[in-house]
């Protein structure tokens, strides 16, 4: 039976972050021979964990300096394709960085035939960006230099594997055509919906990190969440379906026709909710001092749950620019680089950096940056280890079965 990878295969880690790909590949015996990460603080965390200097600007890398390898991994920048960004794609310098991967590949193809496998990761929106043209361009670039690329990116999330984080990403896998040239269709098994447990990633109460006061809610936050908990218990709807904008409850003015239609609709729905619950909301408003002490952003509230929970303190909470958001306790929202750190309602505290590491499937031995702001940012930017490991394992298994079957 043909062995596709050496037992101690070599891989490189481009746009390395804090090493999500590194963690995944070493599970299968891989050895990292080169890493590139442009952010000095992130590269420092990488070096602290893997004893490998990663501080390199990919646009200035001489491909001849990169050792021969069997697997190329790259979590190339996603902001230019993300819905959260301006979606400029290849019109953004961050999107153009994909072509540095192609540049490195071309050099290594000339030297020794190139790496056998590619594993790339990006945001889910890569699939539909620019009406699919971005993905077609990426696939063609890789196919033109000799790679058999999965027909469509594999959309996968940690919660597919029982990790309580909803974070869908696009993973692209490819193999050299001379190794395998038939169409690649990869299906990733997943656990049943809503089968994740929030508690599976939480640290024990007797740990030093758990006891730090910096993770606990302050008096303002406690009062604020108690206020919205009262609101949820008091109104006549348990499933709402639109954001609560308390500032428009008492408005006597006609709805501004110059507002976008979606915004006008939200105003109408809020005023209807007020009319249905006028007696309670008037009492609630008075009880909490006309919300005079509440920050403007926190007067907005998003109850994004089904009827399985009835209290704010049963959910996962975030303070966001759009308002206070409460979600189901089965899956944390995606950790992102500009992170709004989730609050674990039942424990009245914020998610800790170690729990962020658990959500991204990093092992207990991983050394987290001592600066909490940086730690959250680095985990928000990281690829999820279990996601990459599962996709890679299934990909290699598929090629082996097809070749040897």
Image (tube, rainbow, N blue to C red):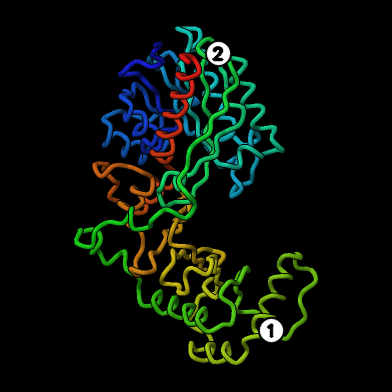
Residue 62 shown left or right of residue 28 in the figure: right
Name the residue carrying label 1. Answer: 251
Q: Is residue 227 above or below residue 29?
A: below
Disc 1, SS: loop
Can residue 7 be spotted in the picture?
A: yes
Q: Residue at x 29, y 33 (%)?
A: 47
Residue 336 shown left or right of residue 241 in the figure: left
Q: Residue at x 41, y 69 (%)?
A: 314
Q: Quadrant of residue 129?
A: top right
Frontmost residue, 331 versus 14: 331
Disc 2, SS: loop
Q: Is residue 174 above or below residue 226?
A: above
Q: Residue at x 52, y 45 (%)?
A: 168
Name the residue carrying label 2. Answer: 177
**Residue 9, percent from left and from top:** 34, 18
Q: Quadrant of residue 127?
A: top right
Residue 48 shown left or right of residue 149 in the figure: left
**Residue 378, percent from left and from top:** 39, 45
């Amino acid at each position: 039976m043909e062995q596709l990878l050496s037992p101690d295969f070599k891989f490189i880690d481009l746009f390395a972050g804090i090493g999500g790909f590194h963690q995944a590949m070493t599970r299968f015996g891989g050895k990292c021979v080169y890493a590139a990460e442009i952010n000095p603080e992130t590269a420092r965390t990488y070096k602290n964990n893997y004893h490998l200097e990663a501080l390199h600007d990919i646009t200035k890398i001489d491909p001849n300096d990169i050792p021969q390898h069997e697997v190329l991994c790259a979590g190339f920048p996603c902001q230019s394709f993300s819905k959260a960004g301006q979606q400029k794609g290849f019109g953004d310098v961050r999107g153009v960085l994909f072509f540095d991967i192609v540049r490195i590949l071309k050099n290594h193809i000339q030297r020794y035939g190139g790496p056998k496998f590619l594993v790339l990761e990006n945001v889910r929106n890569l699939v539909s960006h620019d009406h699919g043209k971005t993905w077609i361009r990426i696939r063609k670039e890789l196919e033109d230099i000799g790679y058999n690329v999965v027909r469509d990116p594999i959309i996968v999330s940690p919660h597919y594997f029982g990790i309580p984080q909803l974070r869908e990403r696009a993973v692209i896998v490819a193999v050299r055509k001379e190794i395998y040239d038939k169409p690649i269709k990869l299906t990733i098994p997943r656990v049943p919906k809503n089968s994740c447990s929030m508690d599976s990633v939480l640290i024990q109460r007797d740990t030093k990190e758990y006891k730090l006061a910096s993770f606990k809610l302050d008096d303002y936050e406690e009062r604020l969440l108690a206020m919205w908990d009262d609101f949820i218990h008091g109104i006549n709807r348990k499933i709402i379906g639109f954001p609560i904008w308390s500032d428009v409850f008492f408005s006597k003015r006609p709805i501004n026709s110059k507002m976008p239609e979606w915004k006008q609709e939200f105003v109408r729905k809020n005023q209807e909710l007020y009319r249905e619950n006028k007696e309670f909301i008037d009492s609630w408003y008075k009880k909490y001092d006309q919300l005079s002490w509440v920050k403007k952003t926190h007067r907005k509230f998003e109850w994004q749950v089904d009827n399985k929970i009835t209290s704010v303190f049963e959910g996962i909470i975030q303070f966001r620019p759009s308002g206070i958001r409460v979600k189901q306790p089965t899956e944390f929202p995606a950790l992102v680089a500009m992170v709004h750190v989730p609050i674990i309602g039942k424990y009245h505290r914020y998610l800790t950096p170690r729990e962020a590491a658990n959500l991204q499937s990093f092992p207990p031995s991983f050394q987290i940056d001592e600066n909490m702001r940086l730690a959250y940012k680095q985990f928000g930017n990281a690829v999820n280890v279990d996601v990459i490991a599962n996709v890679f394992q299934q990909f290699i298994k598929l090629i082996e079965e097809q070749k040897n079957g």
